[in-house]
Every structure is written in structure tokens, then in C-alpha cells.
Image: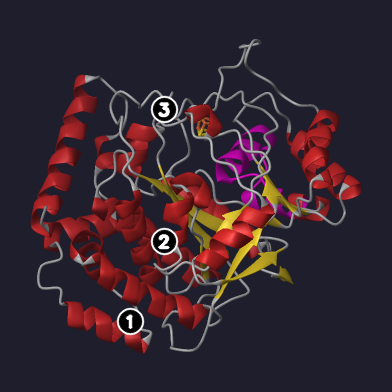
Amino acid sequence: MSTPELVTKASEVMRAERQRLQQDGATVDPAALLPGAVLADLVESGADGVQLQTIRDKVNAGARITPQEGLWLLTQAPLIILAELANTWRFRHNPDPRVTFVIDTNPNYTNYCDADCLFCAFYRKPGDEEQGYAHSVDELMGVIGRSVDLGATTVLLQGGLLDAIPFDYYLDVVREFKRRFPTVHPHLYSAPEIGKMREVSGLSYDDIFAALREAGLETMPGGGAEILSDRVRMRLSPKKQSCQEWIEIHKAAHRQGIRTTATMMYGHAEQPADIIEHLECLRRVQDEAGGSDVPVAGQVPSGAGFTAFIPWSYKPSHTPFERQFPDEVGPTVYLRVLAVSRIYLDNIQHIQSSWFSEGKKAGQVALHFGTDDFGGTLIEENVLAEAAHHVKTTTEETVQLIRESGFEPARRGTPLYDVVETY
Ligand code: SF4
């Protein structure tokens, strides 16, 4: 499909969505379905007239590409050209032929959730005593301890959204984590959970992060972004926080000195222009956090804001969305998304490829599309496992996969990209 066709399709989808919601008698403000500023701009102008040579010149000069150029790359550029352009930015940010990974684990404190996201196979309704669980702080430390015993140096912890969890629980988890595992890095709670903390505590985001930081929180994962376009979120997770809230929470974390990652889950209800809108949001937030407004070749903005960007594709099995979107989009789209992300996010240092979400072979190939990190070994993972997605690895295999791809493996200890071991 050509770009003008894609843009027309995006307009049609938005129009149909508005009609559907009106027919359903939904109480949403139709204005909320209007495209965001970037999408509106793209719908109006498309990517007509974009020239590959102009983009190549910009990339070689370390200059920023426009949303129109991003959309053209995503929808029309030959894959092999994308790899070349993405690798230019990859080696500008990370000059060594090194690929990092971390020994980590992703446990959850509860799978109860009342947000009812249509793409989620993980959650259980409150009251489901057969399949639901909510760990006490002590039980949770036991779960974490088992992975720490297996070598985890970072713990990424998230859970469902529940009014019944008081703010003190989240603080107690951080404090007890730091007490029991002082050498392990706590990478805890994503933006939707911070939003829930605000609801139950009445505190501001800044006060919440100040309290979490004092308790020992060091970084925050970027989950809950899905696609940063309210048009898409309205379909995916109408009860969950808006794009603006996700963005405001990450800005507050950055202001409080807590660095975060940024994520994207694509491959469902979004259009290519929505992906560009997502990247544009992240690039602006990173600029505000201290990334450079005008990237200059050889200068790597670092030390603030997002540490890394991590995209993955939607896994439909066992989700309420499965009937509507039954198919995974596959590795070719993954490589395009990764490469365009690397080129577009000129102020974020690391882009992660995933052996886990896309499969080991695709993860290896992705290392040639602008990525410099191979993610975590994931001793425990429950969210995609509930969507019938099961892939396992070991430290030894991770090292081997990186090496086979032509790169030097290096283990980092935390999401701050501190290399602790080379192989
Ligand atoms: S994605 Fe998160 S917020 Fe949404 S239903 Fe699943 S657990 Fe709840």
C-alpha cells in the first residue's frame, strides 16, 4: 500500500471509529478521537515528496528527520536501506560492536486488575479466587529471592491496577526489596501503576516519585505505553490512562532523577502514522529531559530521561482482542519498526531487540537493524506466557546468540547500561 493510500486508510479508520462509538452510545468525547497534532499533520500532508537522498544526508549528518520522513521510511523504504540508515545512528550512539544483555526477571505482585485492556491475557477479574493472586510483601520477596538465587541482577516488577492496594504497599515493597537484596537493581512499577498510586493516595506524581526514590526505587520500566495515540488507546484500553498521563508520569520520574525506559506494543489497531506519533511523543519527552534538541554527529545525549526504547508486537492468543486481530504481524514489520525507531529517536541511546517477543532468530537479525541490546534473560515472565507465548533462554545461549550474530556479548547489571562482564 502506498503512503497516500495508508493516510487515506487512517482517515477512514478514524471516521469509522467515531461512527462506531456513536452507534454504541459511548460516552466518549468525539474530540478525543481526533488525531493528535502529529497524526493530523501526517494525514494532511502524507509523505509525498519525501526523498531518500534527503533522509540519507540527514542521517549521515546526525540531523533530525521529520514525521513525514519517518512515515515514508516506515511504509516505503527498502528494508536493506533501513538497516544501513539505522546502523549509522546505532554506531554513532554506541560505537563499539558490543551488544549488551542483562540477567533479569519479571515477576508480578498481583494479576488482579480492573482496567480490562482488550490486548491483555494476563489479568484476572478481582474476586477470581481460582486463578487470581495478590502477594503479600513477604510472599513477593520469596518469589524475587528465587530468581536472585539464580543470578538475577535486575528485577522488573509490575502488577494489575487495583483500588484496594494502598500506597504504603508499593513503598513497603521497595523498602523490603532494598533490605533483602541490596545488590540487586529494582526496576519497579510502570506508568499505569503510578497513576493508580495517585488515585489511592491523592499525592502528586512528583511526591509519589520522591517517596519511591527515598524508599530505594532506582529506575522505572516503560510499560503501559502500548501506542501513544488516544485514538488507538480508546479501542485498546478505554479505562486506562491517556497518552498525556503516561507522558506526564515519565516526565515527573525524570524530574525526580528516576530514569525510565520507553516501550511500544504495535501490531493491532494502529496505523503507521500512529507509530510515528508515538515516536514523536518520546522524542519530545527526551528533549525535555535533557536530550539534545539538535543532535550533532559524535555527541551522544545521555544521563537523563529514557535509557532505552523497547518495541514488541502484540500477541493475540487468549486476549479479548483475539477475534478482531487474530494474527501476529511478524518479523519483517518488527525490523522496519526497529530501524525507523533507531533513526527517529536520535536522542535515546539504546534500542533493544528482543529474542523473547519476536523469537531468537528474529532477535539476532534485529541486531543488524540498529539495535545494541538483546534484553534480559527473563528468569520469570508471566504476561506473554498467558498469551501462549513461551520462549526460554539461558545466559550461555544469550552469549552464543549475540556472538553468532557477529557482535561482542557484554552483560550489563542494570537498565543503566553498566557493563559488568564481557565474554
Ligand atoms: S495490561 Fe495491565 S492494566 Fe491492562 S488489563 Fe493487563 S494488567 Fe491490567
Could you tell whether 272 is left or right of 106 in the image?
A: left
In the rendered structure, which segment of residues is drawn in magenta? 188-211
Residue 148 location (% of width, % of height) = 81, 46
Position of 144 relative to 1 (above/below): above
Position of 148 relative to 396 (above/below): above
Instruction: Name the residue located 33 percent from the left edge and 76 percent from the top edge.
Output: 85
The residue closer to the viewer here, 117 or 76, is: 76
Rounded to the nearest angstrom, the CA distance separating label 1 from label 3 is 39 Å
Rendering quarter of residue 130: top right
- Mark nearest the camera among 2 and 3 is 2
Does mark 3's beta carbon lie closer than 8 Å to ligand 1? no
Instruction: Name the residue located 14 percent from the left edge and 53 percent from the top edge.
Output: 7
Does the stretch in magenta take in 209? Answer: yes
Could you tell whether 116 is left or right of 331 in the image?
A: right
Proximity of marks 2 and 1: CB atoms separated by less than 8 Å: no
Instruction: Name the residue located 19 percent from the left edge and 40 percent from the top edge.
Output: 14
Residue 102 location (% of width, % of height) = 67, 58
Rounded to the nearest angstrom, the CA distance separating label 2 from label 1 is 22 Å
Query: Which residue is disc 1 drawn over?
Result: 59
First-in-chain label (2 vs 1): 1
Q: Is mark 3 on a helix, strand or loop?
A: loop
Q: In the image, what residue type sits under mark 2?
A: Val
First-in-chain label (1 vs 3): 1
First-in-chain label (2 vs 3): 3
Res 131 label: none
Q: What element carries label 2?
A: helix
- Mark nearest the camera among 1 and 3 is 3
Query: Which residue is disc 2 drawn over?
Result: 365
Does mark 2's beta carbon lie closer than 8 Å to ligand 1? no
